[in-house]
């Protein structure tokens, strides 16, 4: 049985269709004091909870769903976290700071037998869980909405660390080159972008990344490509968080189109990760 979190309705339905599992009825309520409640109806012995933790409230909701299905008699619980919040805080950057990814992983571990997540920002977060945890790669799915008419395509990652993701999208697309930007993080919100030597003149460029959050780094990259006469720039990301004014920043920078998956359900979620999650289950 698939149990959807409130932020993962579409993906849960797609996963139920892909696996042939029943889709549970879940009721969400908020009390006058602001506290929330998640209530699950008709639970089976084996349960798969699908819940992206895009906010603190979503983390609490996931813990409630886990407790609710156990209370209802579920004996085998798998938790699918399509997008795991706090996953970028995988280490303490100075004394006195928490390793937040570890803290939330330990909390989630108390209510599940297994965890599956999608393209975490760093793979090490899977080691923070106290139960078996694995990640699945949805990057190849991002090739699907690109169309087959890109001109001499270049798949470009914002930094060297994301080259594997760009390569996975290129391989799934079937042709094109791969390159990356040199990125220097000056502070938590300030990033300097240095263009690579790749010639983008007249080419369709696909900028790939695991997550687009504020859009600041991505919009800088797009601006550089526009200055170098790229024919068009597309953005393909696994997790389209698109916080605050990110979508506007990208539009102003001249992006042709943005494609994301349904790990975070947004207007740009052009493709589902349900098939790769279903394979892992």
Image (tube, rainbow, N blue to C red):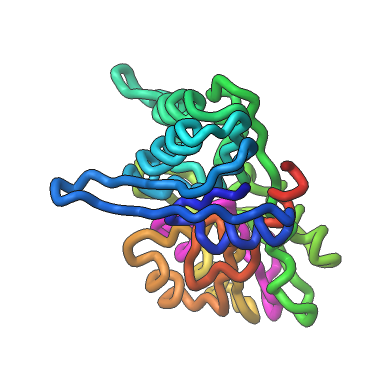
Residue 219 shown in magenta: yes
Instruction: Work out whether residue 12 or residue 256 is closer to the camera in this orientation and state it.
Output: 12
Instruction: Work out whether residue 196 or residue 170 is closer to the camera in this orientation and state it.
Output: 170
Identified at 49% across, 55% down, the residue is: 25
* Drawn side of residue 52 relative to residue 137, left or right: left
Corner quadrant of residue 121: top right
Identified at 60% across, 61% down, the residue is: 13
Corner quadrant of residue 67: top left
Which residue lies most toward the right here? 174
Quarter in which the C terminus is drawn? top right
The magenta segment:
197-220
Instruction: Work out whether residue 22 or residue 196 is closer to the camera in this orientation and state it.
Output: 22
Compared to residue 71, the image places residue 1 above or below, namely below
Identified at 60% across, 74% down, the residue is: 233
* Drawn side of residue 9 relative to residue 139, left or right: left
Total marks placed: 0
Residue 90 shown in magenta: no
Identified at 84% across, 67% down, the residue is: 175
**Residue 182 appears in the picture as rendered:** no
**Residue 246 appears in the picture as rendered:** yes
Place of residue 216 in the rendered image (x, y in percent of width and height, measured from the top left): 41, 59
Place of residue 143 in the rendered image (x, y in percent of width and height, measured from the top left): 73, 66
Instruction: Work out whether residue 127 or residue 20 is closer to the camera in this orientation and state it.
Output: 20
Place of residue 242 in the rendered image (x, y in percent of width and height, measured from the top left): 43, 61
Place of residue 110 in the rendered image (x, y in percent of width and height, measured from the top left): 48, 24
Which residue lies most toward the left here? 33
């Amino acid at each position: 049985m698939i149990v959807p979190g409130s932020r993962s309705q579409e993906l849960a339905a797609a996963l139920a269709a892909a696996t042939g599992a029943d889709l549970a009825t879940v009721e969400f309520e908020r009390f006058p004091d602001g506290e929330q409640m998640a209530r699950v109806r008709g639970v089976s012995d084996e349960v798969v909870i699908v819940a992206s933790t895009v906010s603190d409230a979503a983390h609490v909701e996931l813990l409630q769903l886990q407790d609710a299905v156990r209370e209802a008699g579920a004996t085998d619980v798998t938790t699918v976290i399509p997008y795991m919040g706090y996953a970028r805080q995988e280490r303490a950057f100075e004394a006195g700071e928490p390793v937040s990814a570890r803290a939330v992983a330990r909390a989630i571990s108390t209510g599940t037998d297994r965890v599956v997540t999608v393209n975490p920002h760093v793979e090490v977060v899977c080691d923070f869980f106290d139960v078996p945890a694995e990640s699945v790669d949805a990057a190849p799915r991002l090739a699907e909405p690109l169309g087959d008419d890109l001109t001499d395509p270049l798949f470009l990652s914002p930094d060297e660390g994301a080259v594997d993701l760009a390569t996975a999208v290129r391989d799934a697309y079937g042709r094109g080159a791969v390159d990356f930007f040199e990125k220097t993080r000056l502070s938590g919100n300030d990033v300097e972008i240095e263009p690579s030597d790749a010639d983008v003149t007249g080419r369709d460029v696909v900028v790939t990344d695991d997550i687009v959050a504020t859009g600041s780094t991505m919009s800088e990259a797009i601006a550089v490509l526009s200055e170098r006469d790229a024919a068009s720039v597309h953005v393909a990301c696994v997790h389209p968080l698109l916080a605050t004014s990110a979508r506007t920043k990208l539009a102003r920078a001249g992006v042709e189109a943005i494609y994301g998956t349904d790990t975070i359900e947004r207007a740009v979620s052009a493709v589902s990760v349900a098939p790769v999650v279903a394979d892992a289950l």
